[in-house]
Amino acid sequence: MAYTVLARKYRSQTFDDVVGQDPIALTLKNAIKSDRVAHAYLFTGTRGVGKTTMARILAKALNCLSSDRPTTEPCCKCDACTAINIGEDIDVIEIDGASNNGVEEVRRLRENAIYRPARCRFKIYIIDEVHMLTVQAFNALLKTLEEPPSHVKFIFATTEPNKVIATIQSRCQRFDFRNIAPVLIAAQLKFILEKEKIKYDDNLILPLAGMAAGSMRDGLSLLDRLISTGIEPLSAKLLEEYLGCPNSEMVYNLVAKIGHSDAAATLAAIDDLINTGLSEIQIADALVDSFRDLLVVKTASADSGLLILSDAQKQTANELAEKFDIAALIYNITTLEKLRWSLKNSETARPLLEAALLRLALTEHFLNVDDLLKAAPAPGSAVKKNAPPLNVTTEHTAPPDTQRHAPALDNIESIRSNWQNITRMVAAKLGNGTAALLNLALPSRLEDGLLTLAFPTSCEMQMKMCQSNGRLEKIESLLAKSSEKPVKITLELADIDDPNRPKTQSQRQNELINDPAVKTVVTGLDATITGIEED
């Protein structure tokens, strides 16, 4: 008996079997129950997401011979159902739009459509890759599609709906099939492996589901290739040896070397990956995926559902994420995405890849303002072009005595003179947000351990924010610990305009960005300021 590939053997047979397209399945079931089945449907989506499968299920539901009317639960056993399953039913005609895309083919379809079905309720035309029809063929179909005979239904499937002319789309009910989530693909792969009684390692499933890129058919085809090796248990190592999947540990090693700014080790890690048989483009793609995972870790967490990683990989990604800031990860991803297009057309792909990754490894993502100003080129001097984005860091160094000792809270004068050091300490312990609120206030008076801070009348909202979420209590506790004296704080609004008031963070940043020397350096290096941080 001929072998049946998994994608055909485990093709969904009923609406309830369909994986990852529940809203569409539910809508079609309700349309059948309420006798509101349209005369034409347009199923769109990427390859392998279930368009043709859903079309066949709908055809079976409308034509199942075991029921006296359309049903949401076709029997899958009658002559009509079994013939539809293999695409050979006389009343359900499947047409490949790519090879039958001319006017003559559509005219024959129109001529045959007027005849009633041989044994079923409806004559159903399933046209796959309908976007391949010529404009003339589409126009020849318009009249029939607008006013079809009562016994005719059309189901169109396409991966490129933008190529289907608007007059056709307006005559159809359109359903957009989404990519299938990796977790759903993984669950189906597990089900099939257990059904086939094939041994496998747990660390195989998620990477294999990820390689499917949202396509159930691709996932099953990949699984078929692994099974055909005859090796059991199936493992993640087979993905590397037989499917060209990059070794995750080796990719993480390369990412780590880039994060450590180790040029020699970066080149060695690239060589290791190339020696496994990966192309330069595959390495670039693997790095983009890895940096994207680190970006998710930095912005969400290692436990985010956005990550398709094993527990061990999540732990590694969490550790690697500490070596990069968000701006660096964004820059790395965009640089590699631009690089991959150059790699495709380059005859010296390896040196190009090595040069690009060395650039990432040796980039200084943070420059001290003093160093930045020193780097300002003299008028008329040459400058380096296409430098990576700069993330400018400003440093405010406190006087030596305030760095070694806690701020004095004995009297209002000492508090005022140490106010910047106090807010800096608050930033370090309680965060920049709380410190920014305190920067808006001025120490007004100190009476019997009660410190009054005055906010400008224009900052009433900020004063209320300082009082909310337990911020004030945390500030009091921090000051009490640092001064070894109990401190209570009260806030008030006052008409104050102190020229010595510390500038807000936004004011300091605007001044820095508009500084002529900084502008000169940024322009000369053809760089971009991606962020400003204060220490």
Image (cartoon, helix red, strand yellow):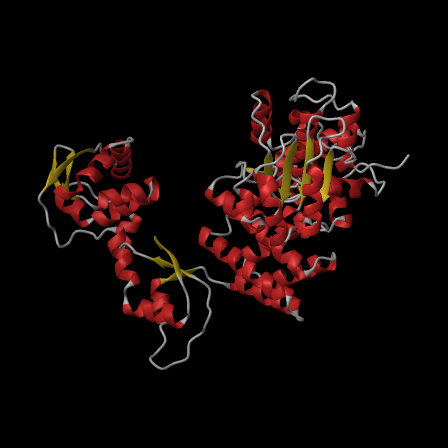
Q: Position of residue 429 (x, y in %)?
A: 34, 41
Residue 277, compared with residue 89, is above or below; it is: below
Can residue 334 be seen from the camera position used here?
yes
Q: Position of residue 138 (x, y in %)?
A: 61, 49
Q: How many marks?
A: 0
Q: Position of residue 257 (x, y in %)?
A: 59, 56
Can residue 14 be seen from the camera position used here?
no
Residue 150, compared with residue 427, is above or below; it is: above
- Pick the front one: 492 or 459: 459
Q: Given the current orientation, which residue lies at the most extreme right position?
A: 1
**Res. 40 image quadrant:** top right
Residue 418, compared with residue 337, is above or below; it is: above
Query: In the drawing, does residue 164 fall left or right of residue 85?
Result: left
**Res. 147 image quadrant:** top right
Residue at screen point 58% across, 22% down? 35
- Pick the front one: 290 or 176: 176
Q: Given the current orientation, which residue lies at the most extreme left position?
A: 495
Q: Position of residue 7 (x, y in %)?
A: 75, 37
**Res. 19 image quadrant:** top right
Q: Quadrant of the N terminus?
A: top right
